[in-house]
Amino acid sequence: MALGNCEVAVALLLFLSCSCSVYGDAGDIITPPKPIKDPEAIVSAGNQFKLGFFSPVNSTYRYVGIWYSNISVATPVLWVANRNNPINDSSGIMTISEDGNLVVLNGQGEVRWSSNVSIGFNQSTAQLTDDGNLVLKAGQNGNLVWQSFQQPTDTYFSKMRFIANARTGNKTLLTSWRSSSDPSVGNFSAGINPLGIPEFFICGFTLQDEGDGTFILSLVQDPAYRLTYVLTSRGKLTEQYWDYGKQGWEYTWEAPSTECDIYGKCGPFGSCDAQNSPICTCLKGFVPKNQDEWKKGIWTSGCVRMTSLQCDRIQNGSEVGKEDGFMKLEMMKVPTLPSTGQIRPPNKNAKMSA
Ligand SMILES: *[C@@H]1O[C@H](CO)[C@@H](O)[C@H](O)[C@H]1NC(C)=O
Ligand SMILES: *[C@@H]1O[C@H](CO)[C@@H](O)[C@H](O)[C@H]1NC(C)=O
Ligand SMILES: *[C@@H]1O[C@H](CO)[C@@H](O)[C@H](O)[C@H]1NC(C)=O
Ligand SMILES: *[C@@H]1O[C@H](CO)[C@@H](O)[C@H](O)[C@H]1NC(C)=O
Ligand SMILES: *[C@@H]1O[C@H](CO)[C@@H](O)[C@H](O)[C@H]1NC(C)=O
Ligand SMILES: *[C@@H]1O[C@H](CO)[C@@H](O)[C@H](O)[C@H]1NC(C)=O
Ligand SMILES: *[C@@H]1O[C@H](CO)[C@@H](O)[C@H](O)[C@H]1NC(C)=O
Ligand SMILES: *[C@@H]1O[C@H](CO)[C@@H](O)[C@H](O)[C@H]1NC(C)=O
């Protein structure tokens, strides 16, 4: 009996040390002699994030992605490298190329994705940090040459920062997946718009004005909650956090919350009312630009005037007819940037718009 217990203890110890060494061996870096081959992965030092190969639901293609490591599900995938160039079998590899870039190659050695920066040094190191950022460092001083936080996929998480510069037009954008089984670039993008009227605020975000036309949006959060924002393939921005008790994601908030919140849903001179069926109507004096589309519920091309404006009639030399006037419309929300002429200078109002 005593011997039996001892064997159990030894077996348990072996098992434990085994799983430790598997985790320990994974490491958090990729170097020229230490690539990852499907299905290998690296794990950030504090076991918060994992980078490896995955297949989306209902897909057999292989992609390299980053997801949370110490929870019981590998979704959402927070970042995808070769989103537009899947690998069709499990022969993929992520490595450092001869020019120092981080690359994803297929079994034929073809480049399916590259960090694509000029480095001039081939001994770079890629590291997955405990913030979920994949960073590429090169040169004697280990200069940061590239990071995944600056090239997000469809998810905002952790210490990512959104940058928008009104002058250079340089901004960080989330871009949706095409569908839940296809991470390639879909129809929607979201970022901060330093020019417009605030559409909605998200509590917990701070907006920093760098003074040179650059605005930085970041989230103040307790990492334990894993507050995560996903721009879905249907164009909704959802907020979720990990519920340790339930061992699942809790969805707390989503926008737009009605179809009418989708930008330009009813097109120019169309008006949207979520309580109506159909939701889109033309303003008084306007008719659908494309009747066939309109009847099918495709409203984006909007409405056109039934009668041209007085000034156009005069310019055209035709009869002046009835004078133009104004009509008061109530309970309407005007578009974010209604004036086409002047663009307002940047203000401090953060806006996430999809
Ligand atoms: C996956 O495919 C099955 C069968 O076609 C389908 O019922 C299911 O909705 C799909 N799941 C997703 C997330 O697309
Ligand atoms: C997989 O991709 C490789 C290279 O892109 C191609 O040569 C090969 O035919 C593909 N295999 C299948 C089964 O599609
Ligand atoms: C890096 O560059 C040196 C000199 O050009 C070359 O000898 C070496 O093979 C390269 N190493 C890798 C991993 O590409
Ligand atoms: C790298 O960037 C250049 C310039 O932006 C682009 O033309 C090229 O297609 C990119 N290559 C890869 C492998 O992404
Ligand atoms: C855009 O912003 C990023 C992050 O600040 C910066 O690294 C990059 O050089 C900028 N690009 C341009 C074209 O200004
Ligand atoms: C993207 O938008 C286009 C045009 O509205 C539409 O035809 C297409 O089905 C959309 N694609 C997806 C994946 O939603
Ligand atoms: C996962 O990470 C969180 C945040 O650091 C921590 O609170 C939690 O204890 C970790 N859980 C496990 C199972 O390691
Ligand atoms: C003005 O006249 C031109 C040519 O007759 C016509 O094509 C155009 O639609 C007219 N514009 C307006 C605003 O009536």
Image: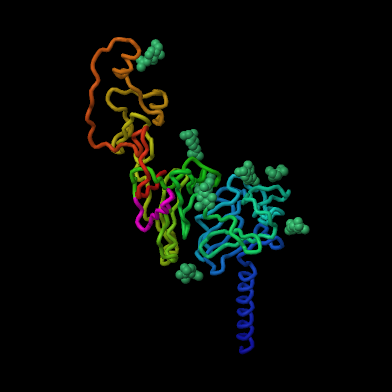
Could you say where residue 263 lies in the image, as x and y percent from the top left? 38, 38
Could you say where residue 79 lies in the image, as x and y percent from the top left? 54, 53
Camera sees residue 77: no
Q: Please give the range of residues in magenta.
A: 201-215
Camera sees residue 324: yes
In this rendering, would 63 be left or right of 314?
Answer: right
Residue 216 in magenta?
no
- Along the line of sight, the residue nearer the viewer: 202 or 323: 323
In this rendering, would 288 be left or right of 175?
Answer: left
Could you say where residue 325 lies in the image, as x and y percent from the top left? 23, 23
- What residue lies at 42% left-to-right and 26% top-to-bottom? 293
Looking at the image, which residue sits at the far bottom?
2
Quadrant (top left/top right/bottom left/bottom right) for the N terminus: bottom right
- Along the line of sight, the residue nearer the viewer: 104 or 292: 104
Looking at the image, which residue sits at the far front?
212
Could you say where residue 319 lies in the image, as x and y percent from the top left? 29, 10
In this rendering, would 292 be left or right of 14?
Answer: left
- What residue lies at 51% left-to-right and 44% top-to-bottom? 179
Total numbered labels placed on residues in the image: 0
**Residue 118, placed above or below residue 261:** below
**Residue 319, placed above or below residue 238:** above
Quadrant (top left/top right/bottom left/bottom right) for the C terminus: top left
Residue 203 in magenta?
yes
- What residue lies at 22% left-to-right and 30% top-to-bottom? 328
**Residue 70, placed above or below residue 190:** below
In this rendering, would 89 be left or right of 166?
Answer: right
Q: How is the image coloured?
A: rainbow
- Along the line of sight, the residue nearer the viewer: 48 or 275: 48
Residue 222 in which image quadrant: bottom left
